[in-house]
């Protein structure tokens, strides 16, 4: 029995390899640092789904196909319109992906469905954002790549090349991460031969929790609470003394540096330009140094991602939904890999409950204290 399935190898994959001891991450064998530096969202999605990098022509056709699938069906829009304006964005996302399964053509091949979900999830997040703020809905711009269009739909501004590059880097860094909780969830659902929309809906639900995708929002709250770099170390030590988890630290697989956090930190250093940003980055760095020194626990991807997203004018409540947008190509690659060589995922539990209980008729039961 392994609590939390730690160290359990649940199946083969050729999508993503994590070397937790050396702090290495690769998609289909390509090092994450190289992909972030040279690739973009579309190229990485192609790599994850088609097992190799595309040629120029293939990438052009793939990008065009994704662009053609960005618009939301009227039924999905109507479902979102019916939500209260203070709805939780992740709840809305779960509902909208499930609804998309109702409106998309069920006879499309898997890779077509994957393209539909991946293209539309960005439009859904933007739609919910506008719905929450009573803003008019922006139509996607067909002349923009995924990252630029996504930023445009959230902020209403066409981003410059630097902002587009940053958004691409964020999406590529989130694209896949082996059998993390949400991806495993997606594979469990797929393993019952349920559909892709249900698998992604379930993955969104798993991602929502603060131990997974929700951590980046908590990191920002923590930085706001700390307010100045001078207070950061004492804050951390107090939290550790109270045996509380500090969000944005630790990882099941990486026991040293998380390579994604290192890359995110280097972007953060390059973009910090205002006094506020420099102060917040100093708070983050102080926390990281103290945590490594005190516990040997390193920052994970969520530690610096909020900082970078704020720089792109993205509100905190969209951080986890953006994690979902970025992780969707990976979820879908895993779902397709599961379908290709499926066996239902059904582990066993170690039973620790009572045995041989004697059935008492309802009128004779005493009730309990619990
Ligand atoms: N703050 C304080 N202590 C932490 C910690 C954190 N963020 N992460 C791990 N630890 C400590 C635990 O308290 C535990 O100590 P103990 O052995 O003395 O009890 C030990 O490190 C192992 O942690 P555990 O929670 O069992 O590891 P896990 O593999 O089950 O969980 C995470 C991994 C990511 C869920 C966990 O590190 C965590 O909760 N981090 C904060 C949430 C977060 O940032 N999530 C984003 C992940 S990308």
Image: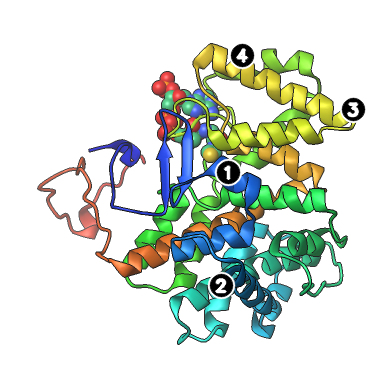
- Reading the image, the residue beneath label 3 is 275
Comes first in the chain, label 1 or label 4: 1
Name the spot of residue 19 as percent of width and height, x first. 41, 35
Count numbered badges in the picture.
4
Assign a secondary structure to mark 2.
helix
- Reading the image, the residue beneath label 1 is 34
The reply to whether callout 4 and callout 2 are in contact (CB within 8 Å) is: no
Residue 237, numbered circle? 4
Q: Residue at x 78, y 58 (%)?
A: 151
Assign a secondary structure to mark 4.
helix
Residue 115, numbered circle? 2
Badge 3: few (under 14), some or many (20 or more) residues near its Cα, within 10 Å?
Answer: few
Cα–Cα span, label 3 and label 4: 26 Å
Cα–Cα span, label 1 and label 2: 24 Å
Comes first in the chain, label 4 or label 2: 2
Q: Is residue 265 visible?
A: yes
């Amino acid at each position: 029995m392994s609590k939390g399935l730690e160290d359990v190898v649940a199946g083969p994959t050729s999508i993503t390899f994590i070397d937790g001891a050396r702090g290495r991450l690769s998609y289909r064998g390509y090092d994450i640092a190289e992909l972030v530096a040279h690739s973009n969202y579309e190229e990485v999605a192609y790599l994850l789904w088609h097992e190799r990098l595309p040629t120029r022509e293939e990438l052009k056709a793939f990008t065009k196909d994704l662009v053609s699938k960005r618009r939301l069906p009227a039924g999905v829009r109507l479902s979102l319109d019916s939500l209260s304006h203070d709805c939780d964005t992740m709840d809305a996302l779960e509902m909208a992906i499930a609804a998309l399964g109702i409106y998309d053509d069920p006879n499309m091949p898997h890779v077509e469905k994957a393209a539909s979900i991946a293209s539309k999830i960005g439009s859904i997040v933007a739609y919910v954002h506008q719905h929450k703020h009573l803003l008019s809905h922006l139509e996607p711009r067909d002349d923009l790549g995924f990252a630029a269009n996504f930023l445009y739909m959230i902020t209403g501004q066409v981003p410059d090349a630097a902002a587009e590059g940053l958004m691409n880097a964020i999406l590529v860094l989130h694209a896949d991460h082996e059998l993390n909780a949400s991806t495993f969830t997606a594979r469990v659902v797929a393993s019952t031969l349920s559909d892709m929309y249900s698998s992604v809906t379930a993955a969104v639900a798993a991602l929502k929790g603060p131990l997974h995708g929700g951590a980046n929002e908590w990191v920002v709250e923590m930085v706001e609470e700390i307010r100045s770099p001078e207070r950061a170390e004492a804050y951390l030590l107090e939290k550790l003394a109270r045996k509380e988890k500090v969000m944005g630290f630790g990882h099941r697989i990486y026991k040293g540096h998380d390579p994604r956090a290192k890359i995110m930190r280097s972007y953060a250093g390059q973009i910090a330009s205002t006094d506020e940003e420099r102060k917040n980055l100093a708070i983050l760095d102080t926390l990281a140094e103290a945590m490594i020194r005190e516990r040997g626990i390193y920052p994970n991807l969520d530690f610096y991602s909020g900082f970078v997203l704020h720089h792109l004018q993205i509100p905190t409540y969209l951080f986890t939904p953006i994690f979902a947008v970025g992780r969707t190509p990976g979820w879908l690659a895993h779902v397709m890999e599961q379908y290709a060589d499926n066996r239902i995922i059904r582990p066993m539990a170690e039973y620790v409950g009572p045995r041989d209980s004697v059935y008492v008729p309802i009128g004779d039961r005493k009730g309990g204290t619990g």
